Image (cartoon, rainbow, N blue to C red):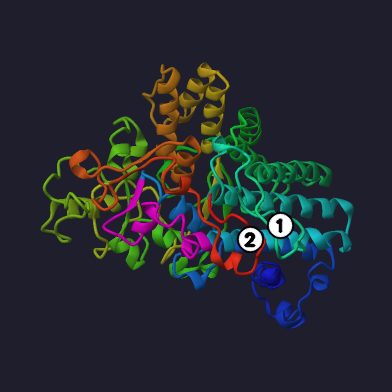
Amino acid sequence: MKKFSIIALALAVLVSFGCSEEYLDTFPTSSTSPATLFENTDAAAVAVNGLGKIMRRQYGAYGQGYNGEGTVRLYIGDYLGENLMKGNSTSFLNSANGNLYVSNTASLGGYAWYYYYMLIGNANTILRNIDDAAGSDADKAYVKAQTLAYRAYAYFNLAQIFGRRWSDGSDKPSCLLRLTGEEPDNLDRATQGEVYAQIYADLDEAINLFNKSGKANSRGSKHLMDLDVAYAIYARVALTREDWSNALKYAQQVRKGYPLHSVADEKDGFCNPTSEWIWYLYGAEDETLYYYDYFSYASYNAASSTTRNYPLLISRHLFEQIPATDIRRVWWLDPAGYEGTFNTNTMKASAQSSKNKLWVYGQNYASADGRVGFTSQHCVFAYMNFKIHNFGQPGIGHLCLFRSSEMVLIEAEAQYRLGNEGAARDLLVELNATSKRDPAYTCDKTGKALMDEIKLYRGIELWGEGFNWFDLKRWGDTIDRKKYSDGGNWMSQYAIKITPNEKNNWTWCIPQHETNYNKGITTTQN
């Protein structure tokens, strides 16, 4: 990881400059060094922006669809869960059914390791060199604060993927703590407790430095890192660590400045920032990732062949729990009244032509009620996604990572865990009725039924945004996918149950490309 960090950082800086001719002439990649990259705090600030570029770029060695953070949220966060499927596709069968957790050569596990340690390696390079850069102490504090928040985010995701759920014990092995970029080659895994302690330390110091810098909330765009993003990361981390008080504290802290968006925004495709977006990854036509991008796989109107033929579907079991009064129900194609017009194993319309009523309905639905529409080459499926679209082809959009609806749900779960059931119910009413997502919504549930309600609305509101598998893992819930005859809509190959203690406890094995280099690891599996 140390070997490629400088090169990757140089590339990220070049990309974030927009590859201007002047910059390329002045700083050729063959001679870029830390002394050049960190000559002053202005250059270091560009390097920090480069961390955001690492989170959204092509990773061609792993194949199409590997694009940074979007890959993790879709391929791991959703494809491995029970609320979202890729219509009529078996390409993720082995990973979705938990058969690859113990494989040290699986590309998905190897990619997650490589990607997050690339982010960490570049963050460490910035932290190691920023003190020697010319500039004010306040500017240096601001660079450090942003960088520490990025590093905390990366370690948090590594801990979720390669470590056990918190309730299994903090003494279990997790990922490797590389904090300087100068660690020995024979480094062993830290425990889950040690990794979370470091994440907390990074976030605490980031918050402290943001406040010292005098620039805590001075970003010009929500795709940049600031104090609010650090708070949002802290809230998500604390929830996963079952630290309910801090989860509540930081969720409340951050969402004060991000009011829930309007009903109109709920129908706007989740590709453009709204009032409730806290942090996103920037997307534009002049920075397109083409057929690698998250939106090429997740947006219903993408021009990519994978979307045209294998769109995303919601679980029938989840969809049928959405009240008829809830406007989020329009995010998916309801096949009610079209029985007999689609294959009950794949959910695909029996004929992809005007001879099939579901196909005609889907084609018309795509452009109704302000939606952007798609072509006659797009296949139609029962329960297909209309929540996410793009604003440019083949798959261009801004990728939201945190929004205040999630913070409300974090607050609700934290309040419930702390015994404040009335406050939890009020938060569900705020999310659903007050926001007008479902004006008829009320909640009088208590005990386990209330927690189930919180889980239900996490599934509905955050569908397709990369949460489902991570939630099920941290809760210790069983994945339960049902085929159509059993009340679901999963293809028979995927229709299984996976209990929390099966399949290596849903914990990915340390990849071979790490153990080939690092001989200090004593346990590669959990």
Residue 97: x %, y % from top left? 36, 52
Q: Residue at x 57, y 38 (%)?
A: 166
Label 1 residue SS: loop
Residue 237: x %, y % from top left? 61, 40
Q: Quadrant of the N terminus?
A: bottom right
Of 303 and 414, the residue lying toward us: 414
Is 322 on the left or on the right of 414, as rendered?
Answer: left
Count the numbered circles shown.
Answer: 2
* Residue 501 sits above or below residue 376 on the image: above
Disc ID at residue 145: none
Q: Which residue is mark 1?
A: 178
Residue 260: x %, y % from top left? 52, 35
Is 97 inside the magenta-drawn segment? yes
Q: Which residue is mark 2?
A: 117
* Residue 166 sits above or below residue 66 on the image: above
* Residue 399 sits above or below residue 405 on the image: below
Is 498 on the left or on the right of 320, as rendered?
Answer: right
In the rendered structure, which segment of residues is drawn in magenta? 84-110
Q: Residue at x 89, y 55 (%)?
A: 136
Of 209 and 216, the residue lying toward us: 209
Q: Is the C-beta separation of discs 1 and 2 under 8 Å?
A: yes
Residue 439: x %, y % from top left? 39, 26
